[in-house]
C-alpha cells in the first residue's frame, strides 16, 4: 500500500501538474496560456478546473480526447495550429464552452457531429481554414451561437439550410470566400442577423432582394466583391440598415436609386469604385446619413453642388486619396448644418476656397498631402488655423515655400502685402482711373452749372411736395406715379454720351 500511495502523491508533482514548459498557468484565475510553444498535442496534466485555455501558435495536429479532462472550460483558443480535422463528438463534454477559436488552421471537413455538445457556445471562429462547402444543418447543434466567422475559406456552396437552427445568430462572416452569388436562400432561417460580411467574393451583380429575410440587419459589408451592377431593388427590405460598405467594387455611378431603400442609413463607405462624378442629389433620400467615406475613388473628378443636399445630418465627410480631384467648387458643401469633420487628405487640391462650406459647426479640417499652392488665396486659412482644429497644411508651391507649414507663414510670405507688383499695378490703375473720372465730373458740373442749379431747385421742391402727399395718403408712389403727377417738372436725365 505504501509505495502505491507514494506514487499517487508524487507522480503528478514530478510531472509538474499544472504547467508544461513554455506555458503560463494561473491557478487563481484558471487561465492557461501556451503561446508560440512547440506543443503538438493538448496537454493533459493541467489543472482540471481551468476555464480559459490559450494554445495559440503551436503545432497541434488534432483535438484529441484530452479536452474531456477539462469540463469547466469557457474559452478555447487553438488559432494558428495544424488542425486538419476534428473527430466526431470531440466537444461532447464542453457544455460550458462559450468561445471556440480555430482561426488559421487547415480544417477542410466539418460536419454536423463536429460541434455536438457545445450547448453554450456563442462564438465560433473558423476563419482562415480550408472549408469549401457548408452542408445542410451544419451548425444546428449550436443553438446559442451569436457570432460565426467563416471568412477566408474557399466556400463556394452553401446549402439553403446550412444555418438552420441558429436562432440567435447576430454576426456572420462569409467574406473572402469563393462565392459567386450572395447566398440569399440561406438568409430566410437567420432573420435575427444584425451584421453580415460578404465582401471579397466574386458577385459582379446584386439582383433584386439580395438580402431578403434580413429585416434586422444593421451592418452590411460588401467591399471588394467585384460588383459592377446593383439592381434597383437589391437592398429592398433592409429597413434597419445603418452601415453599408460598398468600397472597392466596380461601380461606375453612385447607385442613387438603389440606396434609397436604406432609409436608416447612417454610414456609407463607397470609395475605390469607378465613378467620375458625384452628381447633384447623389445620396438622395439618405436623410439620416452621418458619415460618408469616399477614399481612393481613382476616377473621381468632380463633385457637383448639391451632391449632399439631402443629407442634412452629415457630420463627417471623408474625401481621401482621390487623385483626380483637383478642386472643390464654391458652396459645394454649404447647407450642412451638422458638418463637424472634413477630411480632405491626399487629393490634388492646389487651393481651398473659404466658401466651400459654411464652417458653422466644423471642428476639424484635414488637408495634408495635397499639392497646396501657398498664395494670398489661402490667407483666410492661415487666419483660421488657430481657431479651427487644422492638421498640418504643407505648401507644395511656390518653390521658396516648398514643404513649409502654412502655420509658420505670415501674410507677407503668402504675398498678400501691397509690395506685390501685380497688386501695385492694380492699385495704380485704379487710382488713375478714379482721378480721370473725378476730373470729368468736375468739368461736366462746371459746363452745365446753371442747368444743374435749376435742376436741384426743382428736385427739392418736388421732394417736399411728394413727402407731403405721402403723408396725406399713407402710401408710396411708384416711379410712374411720380412722373405723371409731377408732369412738366420731371427732369430728363442728361445722357452721358452727350458729353
Ligand atoms: C497562421 O499559422 C501559421 C502556422 O500554422 C503561421 O506561420 C502564420 O503566421 C499564421 N498566420 C497568421 C496570419 O496568423
Ligand atoms: C463527420 O466527420 C468525422 C470526422 O471527419 C467523420 O469521422 C464522420 O464520419 C463524419 N460524419 C458524418 C455523418 O459525415
Ligand atoms: C472557386 O470555385 C470555382 C467553381 O465555382 C472553382 O473552379 C475554383 O477552383 C474555386 N477556387 C478556389 C480558390 O477554391
Ligand atoms: C445592370 O443590370 C440590369 C438588369 O440586370 C440591366 O438592365 C442593366 O443594363 C445592367 N447595367 C449595367 C451597367 O450593366
Ligand atoms: C482635433 O482633431 C484631431 C484629429 O482630427 C482630434 O483627434 C482632436 O481631438 C481634435 N481636437 C479638438 C479640440 O477638437
Image (cartoon, grey):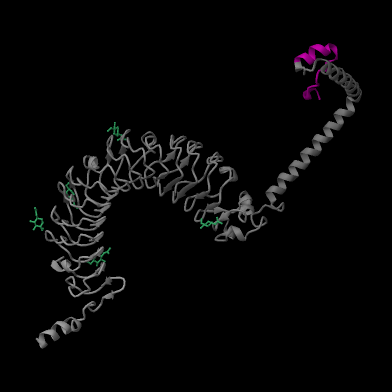
Which quadrant does ligand 4 occupy? top left
Q: Can the viewer see residue 35?
A: no
Residue 483 appears at what percent x and percent y?
79, 14
Q: Residue at x 69, y 52 (%)?
A: 420
Horizontal side, residue 109 vs residue 19: left or right: left
Residue 53 falls within the magenta-colored stretch: no
Q: Residue at x 51, y 37 (%)?
A: 305
Q: Nearer the viewer, residue 14 or 321?
A: 14
Prevailing SS of the magenta stretch: helix
Q: Nearer the viewer, residue 169 or 291?
A: 169
Q: Quadrant of the N terminus?
A: bottom left
Q: Nearer the viewer, residue 444 or 378?
A: 378
Q: Quadrant of residue 395?
A: bottom right
Q: Decide: is 440 above or below 15.
A: above
Q: Quadrant of the C terminus?
A: top right
Residue 22 appears at what percent x and percent y?
25, 77
- Region in magenta: 480-499
Residue 433 appears at what percent x and percent y?
77, 38
Amino acid at each position: 500500500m505504501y509505495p502505491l500511495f507514494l506514487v499517487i502523491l508524487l507522480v503528478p508533482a514530478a510531472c509538474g501538474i499544472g504547467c508544461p514548459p513554455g506555458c503560463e498557468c494561473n491557478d487563481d484565475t484558471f487561465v492557461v496560456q501556451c503561446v508560440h510553444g512547440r506543443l503538438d498535442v493538448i496537454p493533459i496534466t493541467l489543472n482540471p478546473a481551468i476555464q480559459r485555455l490559450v494554445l495559440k501558435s503551436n503545432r497541434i495536429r488534432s483535438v484529441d480526447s484530452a479536452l474531456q479532462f477539462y469540463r469547466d472550460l469557457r474559452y478555447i483558443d487553438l488559432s494558428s495550429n495544424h488542425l486538419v480535422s476534428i473527430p466526431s463528438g470531440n466537444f461532447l463534454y464542453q457544455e460550458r464552452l462559450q468561445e471556440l477559436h480555430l482561426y488559421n488552421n487547415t480544417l477542410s471537413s466539418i460536419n454536423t457531429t463536429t460541434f455536438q455538445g457545445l450547448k453554450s457556445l456563442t462564438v465560433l471562429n473558423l476563419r482562415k481554414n480550408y472549408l469549401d462547402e457548408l452542408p445542410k444543418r451544419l451548425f444546428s447543434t449550436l443553438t446559442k451561437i451569436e457570432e460565426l466567422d467563416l471568412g477566408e475559406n474557399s466556400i463556394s456552396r452553401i446549402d439553403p439550410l446550412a444555418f438552420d437552427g441558429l436562432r440567435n445568430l447576430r454576426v456572420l462572416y462569409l467574406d473572402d470566400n469563393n462565392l459567386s452569388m450572395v447566398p440569399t436562400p440561406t438568409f430566410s432561417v437567420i432573420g435575427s442577423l444584425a451584421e453580415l460580411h460578404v465582401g471579397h467574393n466574386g458577385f459582379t451583380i446584386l439582383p433584386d432582394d439580395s438580402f431578403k429575410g434580413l429585416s434586422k440587419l444593421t451592418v452590411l459589408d460588401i467591399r471588394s466583391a467585384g460588383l459592377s451592377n446593383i439592381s434597383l431593388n437589391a437592398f429592398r427590405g433592409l429597413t434597419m440598415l445603418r452601415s453599408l460598405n460598398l468600397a472597392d467594387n466596380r461601380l461606375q455611378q453612385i447607385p442613387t436609386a438603389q440606396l434609397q431603400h436604406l432609409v436608416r442609413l447612417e454610414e456609407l463607405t463607397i470609395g475605390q469604385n469607378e465613378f467620375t462624378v458625384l452628381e447633384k442629389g447623389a445620396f438622395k433620400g439618405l436623410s439620416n446619413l452621418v458619415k460618408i467615406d469616399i477614399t481612393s475613388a481613382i476616377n473621381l473628378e468632380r463633385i457637383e453642388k448639391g451632391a449632399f443636399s439631402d443629407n442634412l445630418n452629415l457630420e463627417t465627410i471623408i474625401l481621401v486619396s482621390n487623385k483626380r480631384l483637383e478642386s472643390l467648387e464654391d458652396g459645394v458643401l454649404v447647407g450642412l448644418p451638422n458638418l463637424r469633420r472634413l477630411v480632405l487628405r491626399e487629393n490634388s487640391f492646389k487651393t481651398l476656397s473659404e466658401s466651400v462650406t459654411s464652417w458653422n459647426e466644423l471642428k476639424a479640417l484635414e488637408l495634408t498631402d495635397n499639392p497646396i499652392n501657398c498664395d494670398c488665396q489661402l490667407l483666410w486659412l492661415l487666419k483660421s488655423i488657430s481657431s479651427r482644429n487644422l492638421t498640418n497644411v504643407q505648401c507644395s508651391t511656390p518653390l521658396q515655400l516648398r514643404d513649409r507649414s502654412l502655420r509658420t507663414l505670415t501674410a507677407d510670405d503668402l504675398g498678400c502685402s501691397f509690395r506685390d507688383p501685380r497688386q501695385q499695378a492694380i492699385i495704380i490703375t485704379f487710382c488713375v482711373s478714379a482721378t480721370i473720372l473725378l476730373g470729368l465730373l468736375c468739368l461736366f458740373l462746371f459746363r452745365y452749372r446753371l442747368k444743374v442749379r435749376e435742376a436741384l431747385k426743382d428736385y427739392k421742391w418736388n421732394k417736399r411736395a411728394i413727402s407731403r402727399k405721402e403723408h396725406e395718403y399713407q402710401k408710396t408712389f411708384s416711379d410712374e406715379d411720380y412722373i405723371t403727377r409731377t408732369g412738366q417738372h420731371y427732369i430728363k436725365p442728361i445722357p452721358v454720351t452727350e458729353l
